[in-house]
């Protein structure tokens, strides 16, 4: 016995990808149902991205969910790369005419949830056994259970916005799906602390002891990271040990203004580069982390998810409003063209800024030479800047 629901687009995942897609489709009168295996509080509690490209801000404006972002977000026109204490500012505004906005993914998710709830979005949280079916037919469906009840969503299209560990990508047959992966031999240990940031701009630091990143969530809340072992344990990292290591890697000049205090969030994230092709299979469309993962070094993860959704929402709106399937037919190729450029930049900046266990003194010299070249070349700095602010959508 099961309950049947009908909708136009069934969205699996209520992270930033799924929520933004639901909002952009709702703005065009397209009906959706959104499923998630967690609930709103859990999803909003995840601490992740912190830097938004202008394109992502535009998408949130189009979604009508950018009011608090414009009130509370911090506009940044530059950031620093540091190498063994030597600092070089990348003036993104002068080099590209663009800026980035510092505004946590947590806040983006809260704003999108508020908007979706205000407009009566149908959500199913804490779902289990999610299974997309009949994807190559014109009547795809998504089966799941909720509190022991079997439910089927009959829809026109399925949007797989369920992240790296979701089920959507796995619904594509192994002889169709091709994946590409690079797992990095280190992770990032991140903390949140209610203290003013050490600098008004982000500092990415390469030190012989390892990478460090000074970021923030506001003028009073800082987000700091240090590179750690791929199997490192949070139990090994007291706040005191973190602060000592972080200050060493930042260097005495940058760390001079460091205000330490008790962390209220501490977590370790593994780093990987990953892409799944194609991003469409029949009437299933993959978007965001369900299709690709980048190391957070280039601040691309959330922003690539947002650009997928801008491309996918246009495709679905064109289909429903103008009976034009051109953008659906080209979705995978268009999204992947941008994804691969984001993967390259994230991989390149990770290679420049981290200590690799298998690096010889020669590789260390190559990293320093690249840093010196970037410092001395406007062209090299502009290349970093234009990737950081986000390449054009198409
Ligand atoms: P998400 O993973 O955010 O959301 C997927 C949703 O699908 C989740 O809510 C999940 O519960 C749900 N789901 C999964 N399986 C399901 C199933 N079977 N059925 C139903 N629902 C299911 N990016 C940056 O730019 N900067 C950063 O610093 C940064 N740090 C990160 C740290 C960590 C630990 C992680 C994991 C990612 C980080 N990212 C960062 C990347 C991150 O921001 C992602 O790019 C972003 O969350 C992508 O959003 P979604 O595609 O919505 O995927
Ligand atoms: C963050 O503030 O969480 C952040 C900022 C920039 C990055 C990665 C993470 O590249």
Image: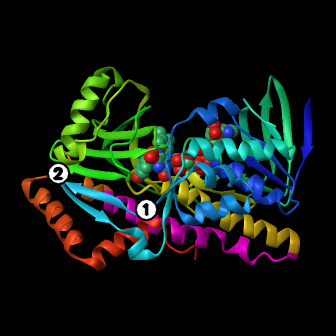
Element on which disc 2 rests: loop
User: Which image quarter is the N terminus in?
Assistant: top right
Q: Cα distance, mark 1 to mark 2?
A: 27 Å
Element on which disc 1 rests: helix
> Residue 254: x, y in percent?
24, 47
Task: Tell me the number on the disc at residue 166.
Answer: none
- Asked whether residue 170 appears in the rendered view, the answer is no
Residue 337 highlighted magenta (yes or no): yes
- Asked whether residue 46 appears in the rendered view, the answer is yes
Vertical relation: 118 (above or below) 322: above
Q: Which residue was labeled with disc 2?
A: 85
**Which SS does the magenta portion mostly show?**
helix
Task: Tell me the number on the disc at residue 343.
Answer: 1
Magenta segment, which residues?
A: 322-349
> What residue appears at the point 58 percent right and 41 percent down from the top-left corner?
106
Tell me which corner region of the image, top left, top right, bottom left or bottom right, holds residue 327.
Answer: bottom right
> What residue appears at the point 54 percent right and 60 percent down from the top-left corner?
304
């Amino acid at each position: 016995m099961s309950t049947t629901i009908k909708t136009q687009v069934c969205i699996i995942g209520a992270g930033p990808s799924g929520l933004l897609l639901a909002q952009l489709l709702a703005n065009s009168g397209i009906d959706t149902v959104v499923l998630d295996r967690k609930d709103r509080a859990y999803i909003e509690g995840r601490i992740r991205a912190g830097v938004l490209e202008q394109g992502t801000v535009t998408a949130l404006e189009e979604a009508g969910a950018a009011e608090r972002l414009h009130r509370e977000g911090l506009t940044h026109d530059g950031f620093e790369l540091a190498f063994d204490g030597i600092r070089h500012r990348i003036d993104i505004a002068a080099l590209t005419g663009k800026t980035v906005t510092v505004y946590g993914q947590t806040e983006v998710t809260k704003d999108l949830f508020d908007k979706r709830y205000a407009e009566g979005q149908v959500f199913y949280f804490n779902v289990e056994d999610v299974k997309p079916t009949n994807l190559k037919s014109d009547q795809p469906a998504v089966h799941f259970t909720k509190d022991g009840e079997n439910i089927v969503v009959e829809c026109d299209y399925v949007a797989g916005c369920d992240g790296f560990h979701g089920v959507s990508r796995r619904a594509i047959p192994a002889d169709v799906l091709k994946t590409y992966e690079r797992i990095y031999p280190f992770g990032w240990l991140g903390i949140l602390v209610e203290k003013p940031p050490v600098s008004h701009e982000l500092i990415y630091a390469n030190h012989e002891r390892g990478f460090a990143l000074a970021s923030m969530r506001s003028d009073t809340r800082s987000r700091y990271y240090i590179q750690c072992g791929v199997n490192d344990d949070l139990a090994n990292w007291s706040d005191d040990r973190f602060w000592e290591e972080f200050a060493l890697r930042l260097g005495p000049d940058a760390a001079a203004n460091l205000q330490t205090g008790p962390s209220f969030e501490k977590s370790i994230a593994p780093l990987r580069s990953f892409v799944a092709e194609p991003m469409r299979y029949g009437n299933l469309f993959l978007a965001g982390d369900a299709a690709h993962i980048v190391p957070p070094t280039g601040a691309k993860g959330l922003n690539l998810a947002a650009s997928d959704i801008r491309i996918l929402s246009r495709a679905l709106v064109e289909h429903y409003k103008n009976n034009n399937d051109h953008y659906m037919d080209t979705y995978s190729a268009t999204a992947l063209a941008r994804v691969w450029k984001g993967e390259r930049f994230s991989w390149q900046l990770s290679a420049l800024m981290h200590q690799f266990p298998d690096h010889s003194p020669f590789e260390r010299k190559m990293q320093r030479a690249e840093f010196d070249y970037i410092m001395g070349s406007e062209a090299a700095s502009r290349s970093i800047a234009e990737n950081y602010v986000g390449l054009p959508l198409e």
